[in-house]
Amino acid sequence: MRTCIDCKKEIKNYKAKRCWECYVKRSQAPEVNPNWKDGVLLKKYYCTDCGKEISISSGRYRTKKCHSCGIKGEKNHFFNIHLFGVLSPTYIDGRSYKPYSIEFNKERRFKIRTRDNFTCQNCDMSEEEHLIVHGQVLHVHHIDYNKENCKEDNLISLCISCNVKANKNRSYWKDFYQNKIRGREFCSLPK
């Protein structure tokens, strides 16, 4: 075990020279860091757009913008993107608001996950891993995006991230998963 060079306490981190308390005191000492005095940061950060003072605890001083200026305008990556409703890129005739059919029940979903060996058919994540990471069982995805069509050749097991991905660029994923299911059917035919 190492000891702190200032207070001689034992340190668990074998690379550190000082304990955490001494490190913070030293970094805030005016003779070491002229921006600190009596535990207060003297250097001020201001927003480049509106001139409002930015607190160092928010971490926004790195972007040089306050929160309100950082989230508005064309520089925001969500600018002009509608995530919900009619203007959303995933909106199709209001189908997402319709309920699932009665056939899409726990037994059907369990049967599909069993058929797929409890693994995501896109990234091969097992259901055990999915439970640990996401706290839920694998999702069962409708390949043709029709909630009424609950045939076994239209359902596939996916992890949550692959299921979210499948809702963008729907025509690609529909073809991809249909080919995957068809390939499985050809392999299981007796010779």
Image: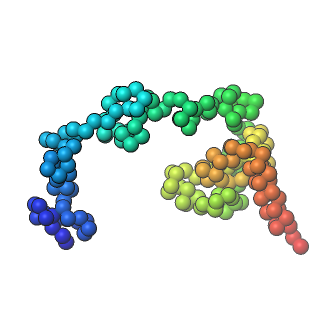
Q: Residue at point 13% right, 64% down?
A: 5
Q: Residue furthest right?
A: 191
| Image position, residue 1 (x, y; %) | 19, 71
Asked where in the image residue 148 lies, by quadrant, the reply is top right
* Camera sees residue 27: yes
Give the camera-side residue of 152 and 42.
42
Q: Residue at point 65% right, 48% down?
A: 165
Horizontal side, residue 109 vs residue 34: left or right: right
Q: Quadrant of the C terminus?
A: bottom right
Residue 81's place in the image compared with 32, above or below, is above
Q: Residue at point 15% right, 47% down?
A: 30
Residue 7's place in the image compared with 88, above or below, is below
Give the camera-side residue of 116 and 16.
16
Q: Residue at point 32% right, 36% down?
A: 45
| Image position, residue 81 (x, y; %) | 62, 33
| Image position, residue 60 (x, y; %) | 38, 39
Horizontal side, residue 35 vs residue 152: left or right: left
